[in-house]
Image (tube, rainbow, N blue to C red):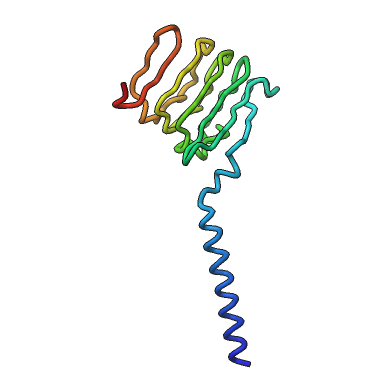
Amino acid sequence: MENKLRKLICAFSVMMFSLAISSCQGGNSEQPKYDGRVFDISASQDESITASLKKVGNNYEIVISGKGEAISYEKKEHVPWNAISKKISKVTIDDGIANIGNYYFYSTTLTEFFIPESVKNIGKYAFVGCDNLEDVDFNTNSFVFTRKGGN
């Protein structure tokens, strides 16, 4: 009886250890939560402007598309992709977007970024903490950001 109890405890321990390891190995809990997600970021909340997230390697790309005014957030924690900000390395904004909201790219790892001519306003703290960005080019009424040490 004592031997069966030991075997049962041992089997239970192995099973619990295996479950713990498999949950840790998932490691990238953001992928199911953020990869392919689309957020309504229109000021009117009518889906006229959306932000789509796509996993690219270990990082994410955001594509902001639509036309009109985008919402601005009062805190960085309110930005839908804030939890993965350190993994956002590329942003594409379609022509027709009128503004970039507060905190949108706060502490991201952007290395290159283009803002179309239609953007007339950039919210507060939108690019604070983007340590990989260095230069801003205002040619052709658009903004182009380039990576530190880049061409």
Vertical arrangement, residue 88 with respect to residue 47, above or below:
below
Which is nearer the eye, 68 or 142? Answer: 142
Expressed as whole percent of the image width and height from the top left, the position of residue 26 reads 54, 53
Does residue 117 sit above or below 2 in this rendering? above
Is 144 positioned to the left or the right of 44 in the image?
left
Q: Nearer the viewer, residue 58 or 33?
A: 58
Image vertical order of residue 58 relative to residue 62, above or below: below
Q: Residue at x 58, y 90 (%)?
A: 3
Residue for point 55% across, 44% down: 30
Toward which corner of the image does residue 137 lie, by quadrant? top left
Name the residue at the top extreme. Answer: 140
User: In the figure, residue 32 lies in which quadrant?
Assistant: top right
- Number of numbered discs on residues: 0
Return the residue found at the far right.
Answer: 46
Quadrant (top left/top right/bottom left/bottom right) for the N terminus? bottom right
Taking the image as shown, residue 36 lies to the left or right of residue 102, namely right
Identify the residue shown where x is 63% and y is 32%: 38
Residue 127 at x, y = what percent? 43, 25
Residue closest to the eye, 77 or 19: 19
Residue 24: x percent and y percent? 52, 57
Residue plotted at (58% across, 34% down): 80
Identify the image quadrant of the C terminus.
Answer: top left
Quick one: which residue is furthest to the front in this view? 57
Residue positioned most to the bottom? 1
In x, y percent, where is residue 67?
A: 62, 15
- The image shows residue 136, relative to residue 77, as above or below, that is above
